[in-house]
Image (spheres, rainbow, N blue to C red):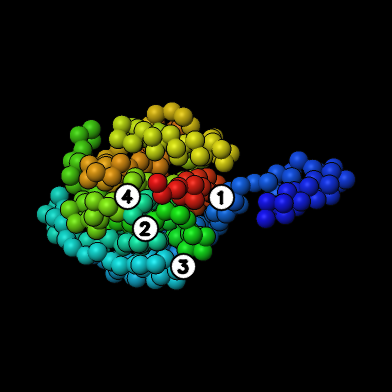
Amino acid sequence: MQTIIKLAIAAAVLMTSCAGTASKKEQSVATPKNNTVKFNADSAYSYIKRQVEFGPRVPGSESHSRCVTYLTDELKRHGVDTVYVQTGSKKAYTGEVLPIKNIIGSINPEQNHRILIAAHYDTRPWADNEEDESKRDTPIDGANDGASGVGVILELARILAANRPETGVDFLLVDAEDYGESSGLTSNEESWCLGTQYWCENDPYTSQNRPKYGIVLDMVGGRDAKFHREYYSVRNASNIVDKVWGTAARAGYSSFFPNKIGGALIDDHLFISRNGIPCIDIVECNNAKTGSFPATWHTHQDNMNNIDTAPLRAVGQTVLNVILAEKPE
Ligand code: AHN
Ligand code: ZN
């Protein structure tokens, strides 16, 4: 086998050196297996568009429940080994009791060495960052804030069901992340990430198969997005931040993943870390214009027009490379 590979490389070098493109061809033959699996950003884009077409995915709404069916069906269609919906309820800061539906899909469910990849799929019921006050009470499309992380996960699920990783992978699509209280500088921490909080109180693991770490994807599809090293990610899981940012750089995506510290966010990763699974957040948290979240954040501009495949590709390929490089110890 070794000899055959060496021969193939030699042949490729020989053939291409005549054509004068030796280095390029040689590289593609010699590239390690992990890097040959390509993340398809157009496919992720189409999964985002499909979610947005349901309308705002506000907990308890008809659009939300149709989207739950779509997401579970999609994970099953891709060949994810086990797919189920965890149901419960949580009281929102408004006093409403929200139904919670967390969607959980697992690859290699029997493997004890696992990684958790999570994103929220619900969308915010309000556009509280709209300048025009009359537009603040209507729900947003949530193309970036909601659908983008899930779009990347659906594409990862499609790829990993066909290109089996050595590790186990759990995809967690959480509900009711975005029903939180936004009140100037002080934020009501416990009012955010209700689906993840429910999952933490009812997580499906034993001490043996608890994921070694988690990666949350939130707002990963914005135009000109850059992903700074989010503050709590560095504080709670700095080795995972180093692993992910290093993998991004080796894949040629360092311009999307600056080695700079970003804002400190109350997001799903914080609750997952507190639940004993060191977790990072890949999130646009240091936008060039706003200094924090993208300018479209919690406005009606968070729509398909502002989604770009370039950051989706950078994030998707990076996370795919991380998963495929993972070896059970
Ligand atoms: C706070 O604003 C406190 N957390 C933001 C978490 C979030 C909302 N991510 C997306 N939407
Ligand atoms: Zn949000």
Q: Secondary structure at mark 2?
A: loop
The tag on residue 34 is: 1
Mark 3 vs mark 1: which is more N-terminal?
1
Mark 4, other Cα within 10 Å: few <14 / some 14–19 / many ≥20: many
Relative to the observer, which residue lies in front, 76 or 177? 76
> Do callouts 4 and 1 mark residues in contact (Cβ within 8 Å)?
no
Q: Is residue 201 visible?
A: yes
Mark 4 vs mark 3: which is more N-terminal?
3
Against 13, residue 41 (above or below) is below
Q: Secondary structure at mark 4?
A: loop
Q: Which residue is mark 4?
A: 211
Estimate the x, y position of residue 24 in percent, counting from the top left. Answer: 74, 43
Relative to the observer, which residue lies in front, 136 or 25? 25
How far is the residue under mark 3 from the one under mark 2?
Answer: 19 Å
Relative to the observer, which residue lies in front, 25 or 310? 25
Mark 3, other Cα within 10 Å: few <14 / some 14–19 / many ≥20: some
How far is the residue under mark 4 from the one under mark 3?
Answer: 22 Å
The quarter of the picture where residue 59 lies is bottom left
Is 292 placed left or right of 37 in the picture?
left
Q: Which residue is mark 2?
A: 111
Q: Residue at x 43, y 56 (%)?
A: 153
Q: Residue at x 41, y 70 (%)?
A: 76
Q: Which residue is mark 3?
A: 78
Q: Amino acid at mark 1?
A: Asn
The tag on residue 116 is: none
How far is the residue under mark 3 from the one under mark 1?
Answer: 20 Å
Q: Secondary structure at mark 1?
A: helix
> Do callouts 3 and 2 mark residues in contact (Cβ within 8 Å)?
no
Mark 4 vs mark 2: which is more N-terminal?
2
